[in-house]
Amino acid sequence: MKEEKVRKMVRERYGKIATSEKCCCGCGSEVSESVGYSRVELDSVPEGANLNLGCGNPVALASLKEGETVIDLGSGGGLDCFLAAKKVGAKGHVIGVDMTPEMLDKARKNAKKGGYKNVEFRLGEIENLPVADGIADVVISNCVINLSTDKQRVFNEAFRVLKPGGRMIISDLVLLKNLPTAVKESVEAYVGCIAGAEKKTEYIEQIKRAGFQQVQIVKETPLPEEMILDDPNAEALMKEHNLNKKNAKEILDSVVSVKISATKAQN
């Protein structure tokens, strides 16, 4: 698949999600709770901020402190930015980066609705962050890096924007074994977060190659079935390749959700 084609399809798909409020990976707060959000957290953010697009809760693992600067790669409707904003307080700063204009519009409206003064949203690609060097204490991301066709560049950029001693906490999808070629090459599967997933070992190696230290998988969990089987992209994929739900589940057993932490050395 051509990188620009994938990027265009991802932008269009998530633009539609932002404007139609359809979910990418199953609907209902039970999906978000199943991947790590508490009911209290979900109730604390503006309605419309949670689009059920995540595969974990990076903020819960980030140990954020008051006054810290946080950058969210692929901020979507703003859910993780708003949760982070509460942790870092008025003296802290949260920057959400997203390449989909419709998502930015939605996130900015949510921020205004919620009265968040310490959050801003910037248009940009996670491979080329619109952020200066060394300004962030923490970089977070939630089920977005798998959509990039150049994950090494994403990790290089995350490393660049972090201060010495900064940390990265991400939730993402990775592969335990290779996907069938037809699925790997399907744009629908890529946009639906499956085909873009990297083998777990290679994913970790890319983080290390970017310069990160203390890289570790904090948690690894299978995906809740409804995250993918209720996804319109998955339905299109199954139809395209003549798969039934049993076949689809076999493919999904190759994919797991991981929570990964890493740090940038002090000097």
Image (spheres, rainbow, N blue to C red):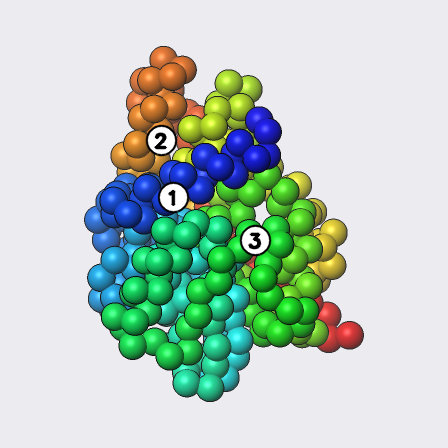
| Amino acid tagged 2 | Asn
Residue at x-position 35% and y-position 29%: 234
Q: Secondary structure at mark 2?
A: helix
Residue at x-position 28% and y-position 47%: 19
Residue at x-position 51% and y-position 18%: 182
Q: Nearer the viewer, mark 1 or mark 2?
A: 1
Q: Secondary structure at mark 1?
A: helix
Badge 1 or badge 2: first in the primary sequence: 1
Compare residues 112 and 67 and report the one nearer the observer: 112
Identify whether 137 is placed above or below 39: below
Residue 211 showing in the rendered view: yes
Q: CA distance from mark 1 to mark 3?
A: 15 Å
| Amino acid tagged 1 | Tyr
Crowdedness of circle 3 by 10 Å Cα count: few (<14), some, many (20+)? many
Label 2 belongs to which residue? 233
Label 1 belongs to which residue? 14
Badge 3 or badge 2: first in the primary sequence: 3
User: Where in the figure is residue 25, as x and y percent of width and height?
Assistant: 33, 41
Identify whether 266 is placed above or below 126: below
Compare residues 250 and 193 and report the one nearer the observer: 193
Crowdedness of circle 2 by 10 Å Cα count: few (<14), some, many (20+)? many
* 228 horizontally vs 185: left or right: left
User: Where in the figure is residue 243, as x and y percent of width and height?
Assistant: 36, 17
Identify whether 257 is placed above or below 137: above
Label 3 belongs to which residue? 126
Quadrant where the N terminus is found in the figure: top right
Compare residues 41 and 109 and report the one nearer the observer: 109
Outermost residue toward the bottom in this view: 91
* 146 horizontally vs 206: left or right: left
User: Where in the figure is residue 105, as x and y percent of width and height?
Assistant: 35, 58
Q: CA distance from mark 3 to mark 2?
A: 23 Å
